[in-house]
Amino acid sequence: MKKIAVFPGSFDPFTIGHEAIIRRAMSLFDEIIIAVGGNALKKNYYSLNTRKEMIRKVFKNEPRIIIDHYEGLTVDYCKKKDAGYLLRGLRTAADFEFERAIGQVNKAMAPGIETVFLLTVPEHSFINSTIVRDIIRSGGDASKFVPGAINLKDYKSIEAEAFSPEN
């Protein structure tokens, strides 16, 4: 049976930490679906299509990486995709506590789906999308925190798109 993992997240933006987790997980799974989640409670900085395009650039030469999006419960999405694994990265003890609770709820709702945690490498432990997004919003250079395939200058935020002359 094919080992399919789902790596869910908002990826707003996709960081070098996300990329590193996925590249390390490629030795564990036959296919990894990077699932960009739609969360009505979150105000995104980049549009769904922009986030998916960024990720596509990073993994354009990786046929075992699928980029998709979903709404609703992650375990329902996993069932729909026949994925037996949920992949999550852990940076800190706080991440572990949060992800452990979600993993246990997911296990109760979908006993056939295993949550697999990979620890980030120490040099990525401080990187998260919120911090990177704040650097970008403030006009700073966040390029060292996103994969080399992503040139942030190529992308407008949702806020910038809303106020552009084309709209």
Image: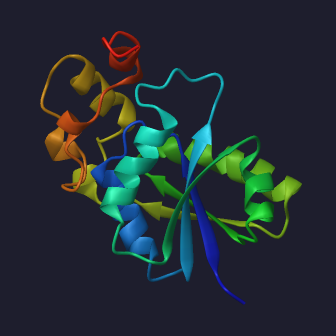
Query: In this orientation, which residue lies closer to the viewer: 103 or 19?
Result: 19
In the displayed structure image, the side of residue 148 where residue 137 appears, left or right: right
Residue visible at 87% across and 53% down in the picture:
109
Please, which residue is most extreme toward the bottom here?
Answer: 1
Query: In this orientation, which residue lies closer to the viewer: 148 or 53?
Result: 53
- Where residue 77 appears, as percent x and y from the top left, is 74, 55
Query: In this orientation, which residue lies closer to the viewer: 108 or 85?
Result: 85
Residue visible at 54% across and 45% down in the picture:
9
Q: Is residue 40 above or below residue 104?
A: above
Rendered image coloring scheme: rainbow
Residue visible at 62% across and 36% down in the picture:
38
Q: How many marks?
A: 0
Which quadrant would the N terminus be assigned to in this image? bottom right
Q: Is residue 42 above or below residue 144?
A: above
Q: Is residue 132 above or below residue 149?
A: above
- Where residue 71 appears, as percent x and y from the top left, is 70, 41
User: To which quarter of the image does residue 129 belong?
Assistant: top left
Please, which residue is most extreme toward the front here?
Answer: 166
- Where residue 25 appears, as percent x and y from the top left, is 45, 73
Which quadrant would the C terminus be assigned to in this image? top left
- Where residue 141 appears, as percent x and y from the top left, is 12, 31
Q: Is residue 143 above or below residue 76?
A: above
Query: In this orientation, which residue lies closer to the viewer: 49 or 135?
Result: 49
Residue visible at 47% across and 55% down in the picture:
89
Q: Is residue 4 visible?
A: yes
In the displayed structure image, the side of residue 7 where residue 155 appears, left or right: left
In the displayed structure image, the side of residue 68 where residue 165 appears, left or right: left
Q: Is residue 91 visible?
A: no
